[in-house]
Amino acid sequence: MPMEKTFAIIKPDACSRGIAGQVLAKIEENGFQVIAMKKLRMTKKQAEGFYAVHRGKPFFSSLTDFMSSGPCIVLVLQKENAIAAWRKLMGATNPANAEPGTIRKEFAQSMEANSVHGSDAPDTASYEIAYFFSALELCV
Ligand code: CMP
């Protein structure tokens, strides 16, 4: 199976609780290579651009407030079948439905403060990687 890249965020709820390192350990333990990583705080406008696909949904305003409420860590992960593998490791969006052993089961606090994000398909992975990283930052 060919190597694939996906995009991930360690969200503000995880960064503010000091558990980003534990999330990163799980990423590495599960065989993902961290291709690129940075810590930043999105503005409300940047969060709206990132989640543009959700514009108009009832949770859009609250989601973009939350995602711009504090620092997060954005990452590019590589592995065979990385998009599906990262979504499996994250667990269900709603932590109440997340499987044991997943990051959201262990760390997420709510549907919104659910600790991590991951791309859901190759085209969204490409969009989301390019939203935060230049080609030069993906050269490792
Ligand atoms: P994420 O994977 O970052 O993609 C969109 C986010 O919207 C999702 O995780 C949740 O944190 C958040 N969200 C809040 N409410 C909902 C909802 N009702 N359905 C889906 N996502 C929601």
Image: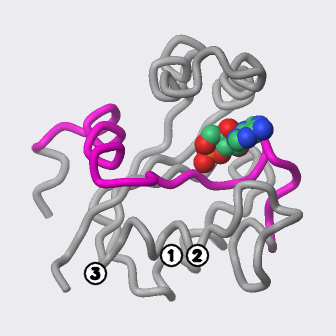
The secondary element bearing badge 1 is classed as helix
Answer yes or no: do the residues labelled 3 and 2 have beta carbons within 8 Å? no
Lower sequence index among marks 2 and 1: 1
Q: Residue at x 74, y 29 (%)?
A: 66
Going by the image, does 68 lie left or right of 128? Answer: right
- Image height of 102 relative to 12, above or below: below
Answer yes or no: do the residues labelled 2 and 1 have beta carbons within 8 Å? yes
Quarter assignment of residue 1: bottom left
Q: Residue at x 88, y 63 (%)?
A: 96
- Residue occupied by mark 2: 89
Residue type indicated by callout 1: Ile
- Image height of 101 relative to 54, above or below: below
Residue 12 appears in view: no
C-alpha gap between disc 1 and disc 3? 14 Å
C-alpha gap between disc 3 and disc 2? 14 Å
Farthest front residue? 57
Residue 48 appears in view: yes
**Quadrant (top left, top right, bottom left, bottom right) of the C terminus:** bottom left
Lower sequence index among marks 1 and 3: 1
- Residue occupied by mark 1: 27
Could you tell me residue 33's position as x and y percent?
32, 75
Could you tell me residue 130's position as x and y percent?
25, 37
Camera-near label (1 vs 3) is 3
